[in-house]
Structures are given as C-alpha cells and as structure tokens.
Image (spheres, grey):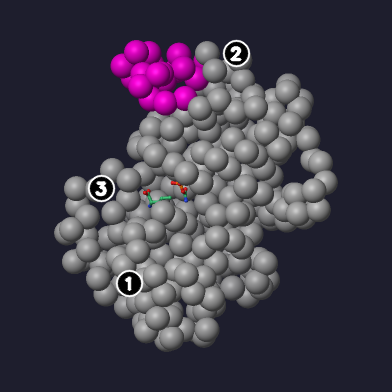
Amino acid sequence: MPKDFLTLADWSAEGLLALLDRARELKQLRQQSKGHQTLPGRVLAMFFEKPSLRTHVTFEAGMTQLGGHAILLRPEQVGIGTRESPQDVANNLSCWVDGIVARTFSHALVEELARVARIPVINGLTDLLHPCQVMADLQTIAEKCALKDAVIAYLGDGNNMANSLILGAAVLGLELRLATPASHRPALRVRKQADELAAASGAKISWSEDPVEAVRGAGFIYTDTWASMGQEDERELRKKIFQAYQLNAKLLAQSDDAYAMHCLPAHRGEEITDEVLDGDRSLVLVQAENRLHAQKAVLERLLGAPR
Ligand code: CP
Ligand code: NVA
C-alpha cells in the first residue's frame, strides 16, 4: 500500500475498491449514529494554500468523528519556501502529527512534502489533481449503478478534476468520455499515464471536442468550473471559450436521462445552470456528503497503521 494519497495512479484497483467499500460502511455507521472512533489520539495537519469549504470541513469533521483531531495551517503562518523550506516543514510535522493534508498550487510541492515526511501526505487538491474528490464521486456513482457499468461524461476544462477522473477511470477500468476544447485538453502527462493504466484495466477513455457526442448514452455527466482557483483573472475569457460546454437542460436531454455531477463550488449560469444544479437529476449534494465518508476511509487506511 502506498504511504501517501497523492494520485489515484499510485493505487491499485483493489486498493481503491477497498477504500470505497469502507466509505460505504462508514456512511452507514454515521447514518445509524453508531460510533466509529478508529483513530483515537491521531492528529492531522491541514495545510491550505487555496480556499476550501468541503475539503477543510470534511477532513476536520472526519478526524473528530474518528476520535482524532485536525489542525488548520494557513500559508502565511507557515511560510513554506519563505520562512522555511518544504523539507524542514515536512520533517517537523512528522515529529508531532500523524498525517498531513495539503492543498497547494504546485503539485510538485505536495510530492516534495510526501517524499520527505515520515507520515502520510494526502493531496487535498493541486493545480494538477484532486483525488479525494474523485473518491467521493466514485462512491456516489456506485450508489446508483455498478461502477463497471457506468458511462461517465466530463465536459468543459481539462483541469485537475478531469485529470483525476481520468486516472480513476484508468485504474478501475471505467468508461469516461471527455469533451473539452482542443486548447484545454487534460494534461499530456496524465493522458500518457492513463493510456498505460488503461491497457491493463480495460478502461475506455475517449476525448472529443463535441459535448453532445460525449453525453449521448452517458449515465453521469460531470462538469467543473471553467476558471479554477488561481485562474480568476481569466474568467471572462474562459466564459467565451467554454460556452458550448455548459451543462444545461438541453444538453442533459441529449443523454440517457443522466445524472448531473459537479465537485462544487459551481459558478451558476456558467458551466452549469441553476435548473440542472438544483434539478432532480443532480447528485451534487450526495457528492459533497460523500467527501466525508470517502476521506474517512482514506484517513483510517493511512493513519490507522501502527505508529
Ligand atoms: N470540491 C471541493 O474540493 O470543494 P472545496 O474547494 O470547497 O474544498
Ligand atoms: N477545478 C477546481 C476544483 C475545485 C474543487 C479548482 O481547482 O478550483
């Protein structure tokens, strides 16, 4: 088992499916108000360079529910790279806590923290990847149909969400159809890695520029913001580039009565309309809820091993 949770590509299909099984159990335990304090006394440091609602709250609440504790660290308090080096931060945190969640701009920084730290490091989103979100998304899809039967379409920007969905599909052998402008395809390094994984898993991952082609026959249609955190200055330009990829009622009607998915936060009226986001085919709040359960499964797995 990998020490860290940086990218789904580091995990086997069996490893990811075991996490999803445990996430399902943890959801049931919470729904039945049954205690599940499997990480008593464990402490998680949460380092966030970017804003967060879901990731911050679900990791902190998750640690409390598991009997542990979480500490939020803001970049101005820590000063990674200015006040002290990533190596020194990782070495110091390793003396005091049992795991680190890091949300950073640079993916290389999370990799560096993980390389040095003697404790597990969990990727809470980087410019490249958002694996924790995809675990919650897979749990959400699995509540509706067997994962192997799911046909997932992703529309819009080839960003960290697209990259992580690709790797999740590639490891687990799923069908994923991406529709993005040619200028905003997912990262080449991710596509190459996914091709290698798909050769072994049988995943069917396709790309086109045509959103209608992607959603026809799809059971799940996923979209994300057109301007990710750090790209706010490009928002107006991006609205023009991605307009044809908006997930609206007309596009949803081209599918097989698909469910609508979004990691949130949404820019209502841009990548998704209110009608779809709030409609009866929307799974967005289930996805958000499942962040809690999926991440608790990851925390148990990584922080629960003997000290
Ligand atoms: N989906 C997600 O990661 O939300 P936050 O940015 O609020 O954490
Ligand atoms: N692509 C988005 C995801 C937010 C959860 C971003 O990086 O801002």
Question: Which residues, given as a range, are shown in magenta?
Answer: 73-91
Q: Is residue 177 above or below residue 83?
A: below
Disc 3: CA contacts within 10 A as few (<14), some (14-19) or many (>=20)? few
262 left or right of 290?
left
Marks 1/2: CA–CA distance: 47 Å
Q: Residue at x 51, y 43 (%)?
A: 55
Magenta region includes residue 106: no
Marks 3/2: CA–CA distance: 35 Å
Whether disc 3's CB lies below 8 Å from ligand 2 is answered yes
Q: Residue at x 52, y 63 (%)?
A: 284
Which one is in front, 110 or 25? 25
Please give the label number shown on residue 95: 2
Disc 2: CA contacts within 10 A as few (<14), some (14-19) or many (>=20)? few
Whether disc 1's CB lies below 8 Å from ligand 2 is answered no
Q: Is residue 120 above or below residue 273?
A: above
Among the two numbered marks 1 and 2 on one chain, the one whose residue lies closer to the N terminus: 2
> Looking at numbered disc 3 in the image, what kind of residue is underneath it?
Gln
Disc 1: CA contacts within 10 A as few (<14), some (14-19) or many (>=20)? many
Mark 1 or mark 2, which is nearer to you? 1
The answer to whether the residues at label 1 and label 2 have Cβ atoms under 8 Å apart is no
User: Mark 3 sits on what residue?
Assistant: 231
Among the two numbered marks 3 and 2 on one chain, the one whose residue lies closer to the N terminus: 2
The answer to whether the residues at label 1 and label 3 have Cβ atoms under 8 Å apart is no
Q: Residue at x 49, y 66 (%)?
A: 261
How far across and how far down the image is residue 185, in percent?
31, 61
> Looking at numbered disc 1 in the image, what kind of residue is underneath it?
Gln
Q: Residue at x 19, y 52 (%)?
A: 234
Please give the label number shown on residue 199: none
User: Mark 1 sits on what residue?
Assistant: 246
How far across and how far down the image is residue 63, in percent?
66, 34
Judged from the image, the secondary structure of the residue bearing numbered disc 2 is helix
Residue 14 in sight in this render = no
